[in-house]
Image: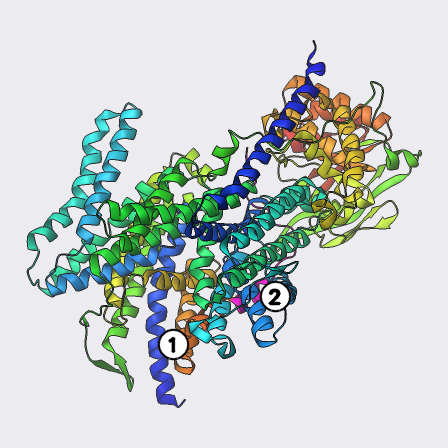
Amino acid sequence: MTIADQEPIKMDARASSYMAVTGVAIAVLLALPLFLTSFNILLLNMVGIFAMATLGLVLLTGSGGVTSFAQAAFMGLGAYTSAYVTLRLGLSPWLGLAAALALVFVVTMAIGYVTLHLGGHYLPITTLAWAVAIHMLFGTLDGLGAHSGIGGLPPISIAGVAMDRPERAFYMIWVTLILFLFAASNLLRSRQGRAIAALRGGSLLAEALGISAFRTRMMLFVLAGELACVGGWLFAHTQNFISPSSFDLTNGLNILLMSVLGGVGSVLGALVGAGAVMVGRNLIQDVLPMLALDAGSLEIVVFGAIFIVLVQYSPKGLSPLLSRWLPPRPAPALPDIKHDEVLRFGRAKEHNDDAVILSVDGLEKRFGGLVAVKDLSFDVHRGTIHALIGPNGAGKSTTFDMISGLQSPTSGTVQFNGTVVTHTPARNMIARGMARTFQHVRIRPQMTLLDNVMQGAHWRLTSGFWAGILRLDRAEEAAYRKTALLALKAVGLADQALVEAGTLSLGQQRQLEIARALAADPEILLLDEPAAGLRTGEKAELAALLSRLREAGMTILLVEHDMDFVMGLVDRIVVLDFGQHLAEGLPDEIRQNSKVQEAYLGGLD
Amino acid sequence: MDFQIAAILFQDGVLTGAVYTMLALGFVLVFTTTRIIFASYGDLIAFSALTLHALQKGALPGTVYLLMVLAVLATVLEVVSALKQGTARRIPGILVIWLVLPILPATAALMVGGMILPAWISLVLTIALVVPIAPLLYRIIFQPIETASTLTLLIVAVVLHYAIAGLALLFFGPEGIRTAPLFRGTWDLLGFQMQAQLVVVVVTAIILATALAVFFSKTMTGKALRATAYNRDGARLVGISTRASGSVAFALAGIIAAIVGILVSSNITVYYDSGLMIGLKGFVGAVVGGFISYPVAAVGSLVVGLVESYASFFSSEYKEVIVFLSIIPVVLFRWLGARHEPEEEEEETA
């Protein structure tokens, strides 16, 4: 039996064990109210409610790379809005929910709009301010009990049944939570999920893939707020009483520590974190008096000590420990590709001439007094490989960034396909037909090769947020999984499509980046030092790959240090020195050029 | 508000601002060297104030027990790691630094327990008891997770705050305290009545800031700290121990916290859990300074102090909100001035 024969069987076995474990877990959970006391059911209800707010943070932090202190405040907005609608306007809690969701939407959009442009630490810090402010606001609502809070909130009714008893509320809360967990998991596997993953560690990759980092973070921030809002609404109508202290900064911090303890790397972390923190604290309160200790002041000390030891033991939270034992949610099977099937270059093939595709004219970039690039002009023709070479600090990477839209030139123009794109932002370039790789490889090490390549096709797919959550994107996903697999095949990595990208060698990671760029169906590939750090054999493979791409009609512009690599491969070379155009020509002409020799060898002739 | 009140509020604001400035210095120092947003920093200040108060009353502060437990824990961790690395000859040195040095002030406090001490001895003893706590906490709690994400480090610091505040409740009880002022009266300066306390706090802040500036620019340790802040990997490559840098940063932050705690203890009522709010406001000052620049953080803190002072006059109920919301214009300002080009941050690694 060959390996290829075994694969599908293994996949099916994994899929069924995932289904079995998930099914049993849900069944046990839903049977719990039959065995538990009211007190414990109420505790679990709280776990479920806080798990929702925590889930928002897990998505925002673990995937989007930003965090928020304001989750409890958004819970409070949900609770207080619904309290107003039900108690003051006398309307149904469902209308309260609608109003709460709308209000939180507006508030998160407004906060996000101002802070998410800034990136870095600004969002968490601003949410800290809002968390304090919103909490204080609740204390001033005289009509809603001010500081002392307000009771008498009506229970939620579903199909005429009031969710007024703990076990009824339990089912309402936990079914909602389970749906949210699946929806979140779906989202992370969809096109939007890959966009979210691209954001991890900065927005450069996302922008290069045509993903708006701002809009993606905004979506996550709003989503996190809405999840907290639903939690707050459930809190209000199952507790029947709310007061500002339930939604203060301390609780905002509590939700944060739930997410850290559970682990922000997986949606299960939300459940694990909320459960561990709330049930754990309860256990500590029960155990301490048995040891004849003063539970009042020691509880938090013991809890803190246990928390710190757990995080030291597993800095990425508890859910990674758990997922060692649990079968992962199976990925869809690999698409079938025929033996002779190859990736089609739609746009690169369309024009079969050698016209100028990229034209750089009088490009200049100054950083204060420093001139990084000065009066640089050159043309790149279709179907050729063009190299930009020069010593360290010659301005190659700056030129590259200006062409690909990551930096704006001080003066000069860049024309691509006859259109001036000088100040077009990077994220619009991929749709125009320009895809790039990075000098320092930017892949997502924990994602499979296939998913990494799928990120490259982001701009070609159309599925949005809801399509991802409801899995309405299956046809589109299947089609582009095939494209991605063919792109992997083009670079020779198809047999490792479901391997985690972090396990590849540097040479293979560079190939993976090229496959990701190819999945965007580009007309020109911009490769930033593709041979850097490669072994001799890997360089030869890379050169062969680039030659094949050229034969297939692709245009390639590359920045490179390695002269041997460049000389045997490219059609035309531009030499930069101190930001200036030093020489241009065929590889042989450049080799003979005395100015180039001087720049590289310091005039040793 | 007439000029007289405005001037009093201004003095008050400068005083508060000077306190936040010192705090912000500690925050920036710890953050740049270790990436830890040290949310429990304020607890050290509360501990310093509460310890001084206990000593002034002739009681034995619980700080003594905390210090001893931490010293033993840190020593065990250090000895175990020395044995694992096969460098047992380091053990005597470890015992001196991690056990004897912290235990000395604790022993001293135990010996004088119950006596009413001269003021200056209480001060010195308070500083000696509080300062070692910071590097010990770093060794025990943060060093094992020094490579964890900034968020994880922050949350551990938050949890640490809860734990320390819990201990403070156990040691010192729920009542707020206020120590006798160290310096009474007012000084006449160019026709203005200046509170002596204000002058002392501002002068201390200036001395601390200057000392830090000299430390960073003139000493080898200071330069090593700056190198760690600038680039951890690079620092390690040239032979700087980022762990040692972390310990030094925490020790310096501990010194600042002990001094600030003593200075504020006669000005504000300190409770066992006052640390978080005090700390967060120092944090706001650091934020206003962009979290990386010492001078800007100092100016930012001064502004926060002034805002708090005037806000408490207009609306004492909302003074905290106003202080925190003062972040918003700063963020807006940064937004308007920001270069809207994609930023590069630390890439995730496998």
Q: Secondary structure at mark 2?
A: helix
Q: What's the residue type where badge 1 is placed? A: Ser
Q: Residue at x 39, y 52 (%)?
A: B158
Q: Is residue A260 visible?
A: no
Q: Residue at x 77, y 29 (%)?
A: A487
Q: Is residue A507 above or below residue B149?
A: above
Which chain letter goes with mark 1?
B
Instruction: Determine which residue is flagged by label 2.
Output: A93
Q: Which image quadrant: the N terminus of chain B? A: bottom left
Q: Residue at x 86, y 50 (%)?
A: A419
Q: Position of residue A63 (x, y in %)?
A: 59, 45
Q: Position of residue B162 (x, y in %)?
A: 34, 54
Please name whichever residue, A198 or A191, is drawn nearer the observer in this view of the structure: A191
Write down the quadrant of residue A246 in the picture.
bottom left
Q: What's the residue type where badge 2 is placed? A: Pro
Please name whichever residue, B300 or A408, is drawn nearer the observer in this view of the structure: B300
Write down the quadrant of residue B170 in the picture.
bottom left
Q: Are marks 1 and 2 in contact (CB under 8 Å)?
A: no
The reply to whether label 1 and label 2 mark residues of one chain is no
